[in-house]
Image (cartoon, rainbow, N blue to C red):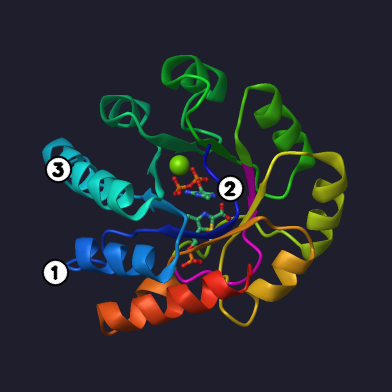
Amino acid sequence: MTSLRGLYAITDTPLLAGGKLLPYAEAALIGGARLLQYRDKSGDAVRRFDEAQALAELCRRHGATLIINDDLELAARLGVGLHLGQTDGSLAAARARLGSEAVIGGTCHAQLELAERAVAEGASYIAFGRFFNSNTKPGAPAATVELLDQARTRFAQPIVAIGGVTLETAPGLIARGASMIAVIHALFAADSALEVQDRARAFAALFD
Ligand SMILES: Cc1ncc(COP(=O)(O)OP(=O)(O)O)c(N)n1
Ligand SMILES: Cc1nc(C(=O)O)sc1CCOP(=O)(O)O
Ligand SMILES: [Mg+2]
């Protein structure tokens, strides 16, 4: 059973261009990331399959869980988890396809009603955000920390907080009920894999 608590690292193809994807992802896993999301917005099916397969192997080696963003077919081919946003298809269909053990997450922005629906459709976790200014997705709808108080009392499912999360802002989110913090820029915008590893270790330690 996958533990849905801790650092949730999300890759970003432009940020990790130039051969950084695998070494930086592995550094995040060595540092303690429990979930790793492959987030690639290109339509390059061959590269996407190859990269996702390599990430699946890394996650297997480090005892972490791979989540594919947006793409149910790719997740099904690899037998890994999936994250779907509001326009990415049905969570219920994904659950039916991937089975009861798969980790499947849903974007809920800042709306408890969306979380209600995601849970009803079988989501393993519910993701709220963006909590802060995000380098990666500046236009994402904004959420407040008060939302976490309400979500925590209303849902048994693990809560993911995303959007501009840093080492400085993460503790406040965890204290308000986030089981996982999902991070791109503050983890992967680094000069070396070693720096990613150090950052991941620091994020992971917030959950000790
Ligand atoms: C953990 C997590 N939470 C939210 C998102 C955002 O999903 P979505 O709204 O579908 O946006 P894109 O990531 O597809 O641009 C996420 N990917 N992961
Ligand atoms: C992919 C994504 N989804 C968001 C949401 O609010 O749903 S914010 C976001 C980007 C997260 O990256 P960073 O840690 O660099 O801000
Ligand atoms: Mg999406």
- Alpha carbon separation for disc pair 3 and 2: 26 Å
Q: Can the viewer see residue 181?
A: yes
53 or 30: nearer the viewer: 30
Residue ID for mark 2: 4
Mark carried by residue 18: 1
Would you say the residues marked 1 and 2 are in contact, meaning their CB atoms lie under 8 Å apart? no
In the image, 178: left or right of 112?
left
- Alpha carbon separation for disc pair 1 and 3: 16 Å
Is 116 a magenta residue?
A: no
User: Residue 7, position in %: x, y?
Assistant: 52, 62
- Alpha carbon separation for disc pair 1 and 2: 31 Å
Question: Dividing the image into 4 quarters, which one contains the C terminus?
Answer: bottom right
User: Residue 155, position in %: x, y?
Assistant: 79, 39
Q: What secondary structure is found at the residue carrying circle 1? A: loop
Q: Can the viewer see residue 15?
A: no
Magenta span of residues: 126-135
Residue ID for mark 3: 50
The residue sitting at 35% across, 67% down in the picture is 30
* Residue 114 quadrant: top right
Q: Is residue 62 above or below residue 165?
A: above
Q: Please, what is the three-letter code of the amino acid marked with disc 2?
A: Leu
